[in-house]
Image (cartoon, rainbow, N blue to C red):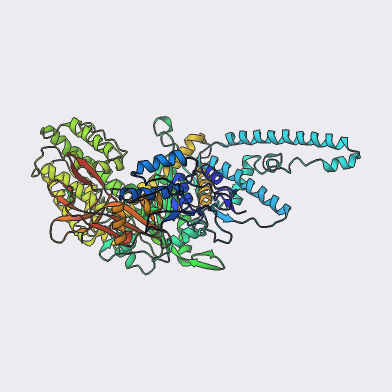
């Protein structure tokens, strides 16, 4: 009989319902269908699809429609009755589908329903599928890795079957303990208690079996030698092999040995440093980057996703590979490993009290830039490179700490790594493409001054100083380049008393690489630190405080209105607007400030603020600058528009407020040039890497293990990578369904007529109302940008009704109504007006911007909640 195997633990089931119940245990983020490979976001969606799509029709009597000229037939009694109701509504005479000798036809559909209830109540609506008619996969179908596999039971010896079962049970227990240790952060002592309890069970079971066997042997006429031969071994059972005195999981050491052997585990290396000024032995833990990359590329899904071609549009920037740096490089390309390196310091314990700074760690992560942006931003795809104490980093300097990493990257540049691809080996080279840092971290690894308020030269992009910036906020100084930086180093070598010279303190080890230089756009700005936690929150505080002081708007209204819009748009953000002089800024996280800027036009929608008010203009300029900078796709026209917006805002800021500008205001003036060379700056935002700190904080605080924090955090992270490698879902790039219809006959008649005009009424298609694709969540009534109207100032959008998914062709069609949206520039909002009854249906690849947009309805007027700038054509 065909068997269905669970993808996580290889347990086989002969019944589909039993397999459904078992899948709940693993709580997988995405479930793949064993027949067609379609992904689903929930178990209920998968069950609905499998029953409707892959259950074969039961063998039973064929029911036919008795209306003249209609040849409809089906074995399902419910479907044939529903079909007969359609004829009744159209006025045609309809008799019982089962051939009852009724004297007259049914006058209404309700009469047919009552007849069925009285005379055919025992008729099954859907015949129960038997083992022969279940929609189980057939023998010989191709396997799909990382999804539920369908195999046939092949003849095998009893010994090999038992050894295979024992091996699977060992992997089940090993996977369980690995998840408890690394994912749920259960201490080793708690896991050991579980193991000891299971060991006691093994001992009791073994003693009971021995007593029973001896009693049976005593009743037989056998000698003592034969009695000993029939006694079972204590460790022959599965529990005995795992938890007995010599079991695989009997101690923490044996469990970790099993994890290292059976899961893809990259062993961390302890790198010793010299003693510090207090004569303490210093060291850090390094995860070899070459072994990490090789382990990642052994995953076929990752290899296929990383080295497939990129779809680019002329005139638009959607990723780093669209920038001039990537295009003009002689080394970097689609066949090289483009590595992003991130470094930041994090407190893994409460930073208050006497523990402040004691366990502050410098964490260095790696992200593979070859991945698409939506996979690159997942925290689980961020790899650990090294961890050291922050005080050791400050004492020994970045050149000493990063020496081991740079030496490995040099090997990656020249020799590359060899990856096994089936019967052949492929050699892949690569290098660091960019670093991701906040401003302090960027200046540390660049060897520049780290004091932005007192040092004359505070910018790593140009040679501007404070006096020039105070005199003219738009002053353009000479840019820093690899050539000018080499000249600065020559001056320092000739005269050590000149340090720091034009902001340069020392050389950086990163510039020893062949194909990477920090001053060749190697340390891009971080939007979160420059904009949201830099000057936007500070300037919004000044603007809102002045609006409240001038009695243009009340503070309570702003607070209540903002929280109301957050709740209505289902944004998990709550802003506390404290405009007292003690705060001097809006205190919130970077994401909260970003969301607050996005809803500002809606917050001020019902207020009586004059659009000519310079404060109102500054609010709209902050919103427009943020929309362009955070946009996932930027046109070349947007780059020039951004430069004009920044110039206008800084001029207004200097004219309205006497508060001095911050250095981060100046960093923003470099954004247009950075976007041209590096692509959208959101590709270099550090927020997704900072989320990685939470893993180490939870691990340390849950286990209270402070004995060797560096070793503990490094090993825990590598064990967790073993869990992710086993699940095999973090590189999944297919469409995941949530709410859908399998049969187009269940669609409304008007929708079927509209779909038939596009040739999209086919039995193999799936009609989806909600699902996720490439990091975006689509649902019915969402809006998608189509184009700008050539004859007016309106914008054309598609209001989504359905997504049609063709699994065989792996294509998605967006189907919906055409809406015209008016841009009200003076208020910064988009108002939706459906003035054309037209249907749009086109593949999702044809959309320039694939971001779904929500709507906000107020006073019977529908507005679009714009989170970023729309592409210009």
Residue farthest front in this picture: 103
Which of the pair 136/309 is nearer the observer? 136
Give percent across and percent down for residue 679: 29, 59
Residue 808 in sight here: yes
Coordinates of residue 144 in the picture (x, y in percent)? 52, 58
Residue 823 % position (x, y): 15, 51
Residue 37 percent location from the top left of the image: 47, 56
Most foreground residue, 407 or 560: 560
The quadrant of the image that shows the C terminus is: bottom left
Residue 31 appears in the rendering: no
Which residue is at the front of the view, 111 or 721? Answer: 111
Please state which of residues 65 and 800 is positioned toward the viewer in this rendering.
Answer: 65
Number of numbered tags placed on the structure image: 0
Q: Is residue 71 above or below residue 197?
A: below
Instruction: Please report the residue visible at 71 percent of the width from the left and 39 percent of the height from the top.
Output: 245
User: Hey, which quadrant is residue 501 in on the image?
Assistant: bottom left
């Amino acid at each position: 009989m065909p068997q269905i195997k669970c993808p996580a633990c290889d347990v086989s089931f002969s019944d589909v319902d039993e397999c459904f119940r078992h899948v709940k245990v693993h709580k997988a983020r995405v479930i793949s269908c064993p027949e067609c490979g379609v992904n689903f976001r929930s178990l209920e969606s998968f069950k609905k699809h499998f029953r409707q799509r892959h259950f074969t029709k039961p063998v039973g009597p064929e029911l036919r429609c008795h209306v003249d000229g209609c040849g409809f037939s089906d074995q399902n009694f419910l479907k044939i009755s529903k079909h007969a109701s359609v004829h009744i509504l159209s006025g045609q005479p309809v008799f019982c589908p089962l051939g009852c000798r009724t004297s007259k036809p049914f006058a209404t559909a309700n009469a047919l329903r009552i007849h069925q209830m009285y005379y055919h109540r025992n008729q099954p609506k859907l015949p129960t599928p038997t083992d022969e008619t279940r929609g189980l996969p057939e023998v010989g179908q191709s396997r799909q890795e990382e999804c539920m596999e369908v195999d046939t039971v092949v003849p095998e010896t009893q010994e090999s079957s038992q050894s295979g079962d024992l091996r699977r049970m060992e992997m089940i227990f090993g996977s369980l303990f690995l998840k408890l240790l690394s994912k749920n952060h259960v201490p080793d002592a708690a896991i050991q208690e579980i193991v000891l309890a299971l060991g006691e069970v093994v001992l009791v079971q073994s003693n009971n079996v021995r007593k029973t066997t001896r009693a049976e042997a005593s009743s037989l006429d056998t000698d003592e030698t034969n009695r000993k031969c029939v006694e079972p071994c204590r460790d022959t059972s599965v529990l005995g092999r795992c938890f007995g005195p010599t079991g695989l999981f009997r101690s923490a050491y044996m469990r970790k040995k099993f994890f290292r052997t059976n899961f893809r585990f990259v062993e961390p290396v302890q790198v010793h440093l010299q003693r510090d000024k207090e004569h303490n032995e210093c060291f850090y833990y390094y995860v070899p980057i070459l072994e990490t990359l090789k382990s990642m590329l052994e995953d076929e899904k990752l290899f296929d996703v990383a080295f497939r071609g990129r779809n680019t549009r002329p005139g638009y920037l959607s990723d780093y590979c669209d920038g001039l740096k990537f295009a003009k490089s002689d080394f970097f390309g689609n066949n090289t490993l483009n590595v992003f390196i991130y470094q930041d310091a994090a407190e893994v314990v409460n930073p208050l009290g006497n523990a402040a700074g004691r366990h502050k760690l410098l964490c260095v992560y790696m992200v593979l830039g070859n991945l698409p942006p939506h996979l690159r931003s997942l925290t689980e795809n961020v790899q650990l490179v090294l961890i050291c104490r922050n005080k050791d980093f400050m004492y020994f300097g970045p050149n000493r700490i990063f020496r081991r990493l740079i030496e490995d990257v040099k090997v990656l540049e020249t020799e590359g790594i060899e990856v096994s691809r089936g019967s052949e080996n492929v050699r892949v080279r690569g290098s660091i493409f960019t670093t991701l840092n906040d401003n302090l971290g960027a200046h540390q690894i660049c060897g520049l001054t780290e004091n932005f308020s007192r040092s004359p030269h505070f910018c790593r992009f140009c040679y501007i100083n404070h006096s020039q910036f105070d005199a003219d906020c738009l002053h353009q100084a000479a840019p820093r380049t690899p050539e000018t930086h080499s000249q600065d180093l020559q001056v320092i070598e000739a005269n050590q008393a000149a340090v720091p010279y034009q902001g340069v303190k020392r050389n950086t080890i990163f510039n020893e690489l062949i194909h990477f230089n920090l001053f060749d756009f190697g340390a891009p700005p971080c939007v979160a630190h420059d904009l949201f936690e830099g000057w936007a929150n500070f300037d919004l505080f000044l603007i809102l405080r002045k609006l409240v002081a001038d009695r243009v708007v009340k503070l309570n209204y702003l607070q209540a209105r903002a929280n109301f819009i957050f709740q209505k748009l289902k944004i998990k953000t709550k802003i506390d607007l404290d405009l007292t002089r003690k705060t001097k800024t809006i205190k919130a996280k970077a994401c909260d400030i970003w969301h607050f800027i996005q809803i500002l036009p809606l917050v001020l929608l019902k207020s009586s603020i004059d659009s000519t008010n310079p404060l109102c203009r500054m609010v709209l300029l902050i919103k427009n600058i943020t929309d362009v900078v955070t946009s996932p796709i930027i046109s070349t026209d947007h780059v020039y528009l951004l430069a004009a917006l920044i110039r206008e805002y800084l001029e207004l800021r200097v004219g309205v407020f006497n508060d001095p500008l911050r250095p981060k205001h100046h960093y923003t003036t470099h954004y247009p040039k950075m976007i041209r060379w590096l692509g959208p700056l959101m590709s270099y935002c550090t927020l997704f890497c900072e989320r990685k700190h939470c893993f180490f904080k939870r691990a340390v605080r849950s286990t209270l293990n402070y004995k060797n924090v560096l070793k503990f955090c490094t090993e825990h992270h590598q064990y967790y990578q073993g869990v992710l490698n086993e699940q095999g879902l973090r590189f999944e790039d297919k469409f995941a369904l949530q709410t859908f219809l399998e049969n187009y006959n269940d669609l409304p008649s008007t929708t079927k007529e509209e779909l038939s005009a596009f040739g999209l009424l086919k039995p193999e298609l799936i009609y989806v109302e909600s699902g996720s694709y490439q990091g975006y969540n689509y649902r019915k009534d969402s809006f998608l940008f189509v184009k700008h109207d050539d004859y007016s100032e309106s914008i054309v959008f598609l209001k989504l009704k359905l997504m049609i998914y063709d699994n065989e062709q792996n294509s998605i069609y967006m189907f919906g109504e055409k809406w015209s949206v008016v841009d009200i520039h003076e208020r910064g909002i988009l108002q939706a007006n459906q003035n054309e009854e037209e249907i749009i249906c086109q593949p999702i690849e044809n959309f320039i911007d694939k971001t779904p947009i929500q709507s906000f309805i107020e006073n019977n007027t529908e507005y679009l909640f714009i989170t970023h700038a729309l592409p210009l054509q």
